[in-house]
Image (cartoon, helix red, strand yellow):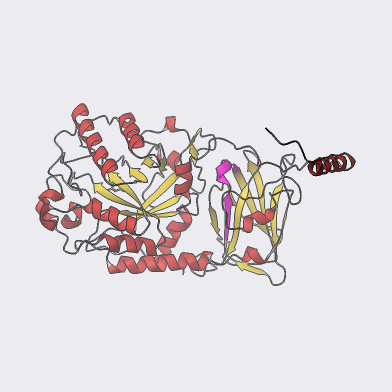
Amino acid sequence: MAKPYSSMSCLIITTFTLLHLIFPSQEVKITPPPLPILPLPNYAQLKWQQRELIMFFHFGVNTFTDREWGTGHENPAIFNPTRLDANQWVDTAVQAGVSLVILTAKHHDGFCLWPSKYTDHSVIRSPWKNGQGDVVQEFVNAAKARGVDVGLYLSPWDRHDKRYGKNKEYNEHYVAQLQELLNKYGDVKEIWFDGAKGSNAPNMTYYFDDWFAMVRELQSTINIFSDAGPGIRWVGNEDGFAGSTSWSTINRTLLSIGNSNADYLNSGDPKGTDWLPPECDVSIRKGWFWHKSQAPKNLSDLLEIYYKSVGRNCVLLLNVPPNTQGLISDSDVQRLKEFRSAIDTIFSTNLANKCSIKASSQRGGKNGGFGPENVLDNDHLWTYWAPRDEDKDDHWIEFKAKDKPLRFNVLRIQEAIGLGQRIKGHEIYVDGIKIANGTTIGYKKLHRLEKGMVNAYSVRIKIIESRAIPLISSVGLHFDPFWNSNGQVK
Ligand code: FUL
């Protein structure tokens, strides 16, 4: 039986009720975040976007034949890397700040880097490890040991397999290989469906719906890459350059794999109904595969690529090809070290941290949780400055130097894309003078100032057009010592 209330607890309840009647408590009203504006990224896309830099490894028979596209008639005996060490590949990636590595499990020549049971055109017939080796397994092990995620490239175009060109037979074969790769090697975070195919290749229909459904069935957090997604889209070129306008949104119905309009892919579409962010694939060397005669791009070219990919709302997929020994060449390792150290030098100091900040207005009022100070914390997604809903335009955020002028030549702006990509136009003013402008922002926009160094007391970012109230999650004022004042790379 329940105990009757004691007289003490009765007294407490009565006192509480009386106090409540005399001083009715203020209702605590916390302003919620604004409604999202669709389309939105899904979980896997959001994780992918934050990686910024990922790495591709093109390796296979072409490495040994000095070709870019194999014929499909290569003798597997030529595949014989003398010192293959996937740990060295992934160490190189980690040093470059990479969290996802993608391997060409099968390129257009059809040679498989794993012992597929559906073909004998693979490592099984090579002298490497007496046909007992499995490059995909070694790659996955090395990545796992370093906490790095894995992606795989399985070329649809296959110049070796006799079934290529016969719809049912080849699609069966292809889906079987997908099952092998996505069942056997643990978590795979990206699958790369390359739309490329030679002009004389037999005609055939790829059963994309079957492929994608199978991929999703086997890997729940994978991103599917192709010209047309459905997870990530191609940026439309192999230079590593996104458009200066770069929307993560696009209309998938206007895309077709292997046959999309490159300009549309490059810029995306503010009216797009699908969240399908662009990935910039480019090689550190001229070719995708290793060639003795080629050398890595120089640092200024790599930085140019970085500004035009990561700095234009993209993820940069940088290819670093292992050589005939099965190692990343020293020259590439060295260049990647310089590249990482340059990025760290540029972005590790944010001059805005020392400034006072003001904004045109802020959602929820002072201490409402949406103030401009949010753009200086380390959360570049879920804390952000938001203006009031009532203010339809003239949104701005301003940074003022407290003592000496600000010296910078790079401005970084990030949108809170978790609630949709919103901003359509923005301008930058220093001490009241317009020095740069741009269209949309997205996850990250880097303005490397054409006129070089700025010396200024105030920096104002004006949002001049937006699909809904703009939400800015981070701003940085940086100094890039590799960029000199006449707009030339040092
Ligand atoms: C292209 C292919 O033809 C190249 O060989 C390379 O794999 C590149 C990433 O995609 O379409």
The residue lying furthest to the right in this view is 22
Instruction: State left or right for residue 16 relative to residue 353.
Output: right
Q: Nearer the viewer, residue 476 or 28?
A: 28
Instruction: State left or right for residue 20 relative to residue 159.
Output: right
Residue 360 locus on image (x, y percent): 74, 50
Q: Which of 234 and 151 is in front in this view?
A: 151
Q: Is residue 349 visible?
A: yes
Residue at 48 percent of width and 42 percent of height: 43
Q: Does the magenta stretch include residue 414?
A: yes
Question: In the image, is residue 453 above or below residue 169?
Answer: below
Q: Give the range drawn in magenta.
A: 411-423
Question: In the image, is residue 252 above or below residue 114?
Answer: above
Question: In the image, is residue 412 above or below residue 224?
Answer: below
Residue 367 locus on image (x, y percent): 74, 51
Residue at 28 percent of width and 47 percent of height: 185
Residue at 57 percent of width and 52 percent of height: 414
Residue 413 image-quadrant placement: bottom right
Q: In the rendered image, which quarter contains the N terminus?
A: top right
Residue 329 locus on image (x, y percent): 27, 66
Residue 357 locus on image (x, y percent): 71, 59
Q: Is residue 483 visible?
A: no
